[in-house]
Image (cartoon, helix red, strand yellow):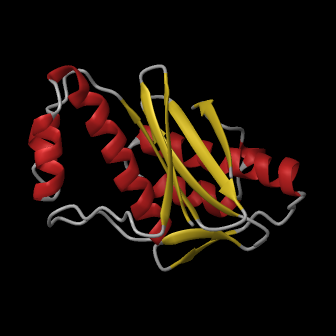
Amino acid sequence: MKLFIEKITYPSESEVSSLELEYAESLKSPKRREEFLCGRALLRRIAKSEYGCENIEVKINGKKPELVCSSFYFSISHSHGLIALAVSDKPVGVDIEYIDPKRDTGKIIKRFSLEIQREYEEISESEKKGYFYNLWTSYESCIKLRGETISTREFDMCRDNVLFVTQRKENYALTCASFR
């Protein structure tokens, strides 16, 4: 698995396809448009430089985007000005989150299982933010790995048969998930 992290900058039109530009125009938020196009431009650059993949056409398989050039799998995430791209020879999910000191993590943790809520309550206040963001990025990366969407019910952590790699980069938490 390889991980690439960049600052989000609006790509040139030559870095994305006309279909991607058309889709981006349908997005209401300028920020979301920029994130989408930046992700696709980064994907194109890495696919070409790392894998020699010239046909950079993305298709949607269920809810998970895949390359027509199927020599590798990818996952993209963005948060507060950074974009992360994980590539691997097997399915992968990635999530990056800005660690917001004002975020009420206790409110969100209640959507996880009782076991996770108990773990959260047992740790010190100074460790709660780190615990939460490691948990949240693991959860979201697993959702992307499995090609699912976030549930409105209790959050289900997929721990069986999944390998998580979590790290910090400045004020960001990042997790990559792949099947063992």
Residue nearer the viewer, 135 or 48: 135
Residue drawn 17% across and 64% down? 152
**Residue at x-position 71% and y-position 58%:** 17
What residue is drawn where x is 31% and y is 46%? 136
The residue depicted at 42 percent of the width and 60 percent of the height is: 142
**Residue 10 point in image, percent of width and height:** 61, 34
Please, is residue 62 above or below residue 132 in the view? below
User: Residue most toward the right?
Assistant: 52
The percent position of residue 14, horizontal first and vertical second, equals 78, 46
On screen, residue 50 versus residue 90, left or right, reads right
Query: Does residue 41 sit above or below 179 in this rendering?
Result: above
Q: Residue furthest front?
A: 122
Relative depth, front residue between 145 and 48: 145
Q: Tally the numbered discs.
A: 0
Residue 62, relative to residue 30: is it above or below? Answer: below
Indicate the quadrant where residue 155 lies: bottom left
Residue 129: x, y in percent?
25, 29
Residue nearest the observer in this picture, 24 or 49: 49
Quadrant occupied by the C terminus: bottom right
Where residue 157 appears, x then y in whole percent?
30, 61
Return the residue found at the far bottom.
Answer: 62
- Horizontally, residue 91 falls left or right of residue 141, namely right
